[in-house]
Image: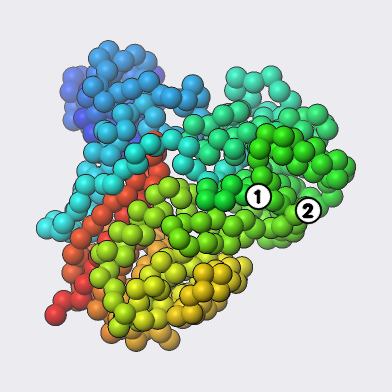
Amino acid sequence: MEISENIKINIDDLAMGGEGVGRMEGPSTSLRAGMAVFVPYSVPGDELKIRLTDAKKNFGRGKIIDIVKPSPDRVEPKCPLAKDCGGCQWQHISYTAQLRFKTKIIKETLERIGKLKSIKVNEIIGMREPWGFRNKIQYPISNAGRVMSNAKIVMGYYRQGTHEVVDIDNCPIEHPKLSRAAKIVKDVLNKLDYSVYNEDRRTGLFRHLRARIGFGTGEVLLTFITNEKAVPGSKELIKQVVERCKKDDINVVGICQNINPRQTNVIMGEKSWTLWGRDFIYDKLGDLKFKVSNESFYQVNPVMIKTLYDKALELSDVTKNDTVIDAYSGIGTVALWFARNAQFVYGIEEVKQAVYDAAENAELNKIDNCRFSIGKVERLLPELKQGDMVILDPPRGGCEEKVLKTIAKSSFKKVVYISCNPASLARDLAYLSNSGFEVSEVQPVDMFPHSFHIETVVRVSRNE
């Protein structure tokens, strides 16, 4: 096999992982005719000259050498670092086309994995302005593998498929104040000559910066993830960061530290504490107010959260006579959204701090028909299986089989499934479809513009 072979190819589809897909038509010393070739940063409709970088038994991978004829859906990325940075995969595709492709991916994934061919899949709901929507960043910090920067310390996202940090000063998909706060932190770390973590030697202090902002309040929380507890000169570091942020109209309400000494790709360690201010922010969604602690999960696109939750509420047809179980309830955002229309809502969440936040958020909003329990869904749901409806909003891996079995044996008449992974969604819907339920309606919502990630809300009803 000649891996470095140059070939011409037409891109005709997008894979679920975001890469364009074409098929060999002419002779090749490395690939058979008709074999699929995956090409990053390509667009359906592109005519390309590519260099073959990998050739397996059933597929190949390639890198663009020349765009012979661009697709009508190809656009110039808004960010000059889009091709280097792994934060976005689709900035080179028009937003209208992104939405079209995402709807297509949902339909095809449900058919291929879930064998669900006759269900209603609505067109995806997109953003009016798909920029500046992220309320959280998690930047690795490095002084090696710099891209387009001469600074000692660089901070940004990893180049796709590597641990090489692309230095970023202004990211167009983030809230602008997060980008400015990150640049301030980077400047201060450079000025005070702090060390940064080296993955090979496992030495150095600063590993990541995490920052979160409440779109409805403007409150910002910063978290330093470090390799060890001691931060020499921390008072001066905090003073300079807070003062500079204040001058730039960035309302930092707290600075936390998290220790992660492990050699791992997991960003956060097990121990966190507050260095200055408080360890949470407040945010507003619609007419509700939420406390969001440092370690609690919160959707990254608050602009579209209301759209997502309103659609979930609409599909549920929940009434004042319904008892609802909110599995994977987090800080209570979905539970409280439903509580005003339901008789009672029980929330289940395994992160202790998130449960405390959820209880406090119910009190904050004067909602008294909710109760939240700490524990794994697969353990607690069997104890609460007598209800009218269950809301599922699991992690990317989907639901444990025990959860689905419990639902199948329960009295639940309806399931509202919120998913961020089409593959695990299709698998779980197939299980429910084979267990006495019918998938009634599927509504994708674009929570993650310029990436291949797709959020979906689904109504599932028990067969009569």
Which picture quadrant has residue 413?
bottom left
Residue 462 visible in the shown view? yes
Which tag, 1 or 2, sits closer to the chain's start? Answer: 1
Residue located 71% across and 57% down the image? 278
Give the quarter of the figure containing the C terminus: bottom left
Q: Residue at x 26, y 54 (%)?
A: 443
Residue highlighted by disc 1: 221
The residue labelled by disc 2 is: 275
| Residue 20: assigned label | none
* 65 on left or right of 114: right
Q: Is residue 83 left or right of residue 46?
A: right
The answer to which of 111 and 256 lies nearer the viewer is: 256
Element carrying mark 2: strand
Residue 190: quadrant of the picture: top right
User: Residue 350 appears at what percent x and percent y?
Assistant: 54, 71
In the rendered image, the quadrant that contains the N terminus is top left
C-alpha separation, residue under disc 1 versus residue under disc 2: 11 Å
Which amino acid is tagged 2? Answer: Leu
Residue contact between numbered discs 1 and 2, judged by CB atoms under 8 Å: no
Q: Amino acid at mark 1?
A: Leu
Foreground residue, 427 or 77?
77
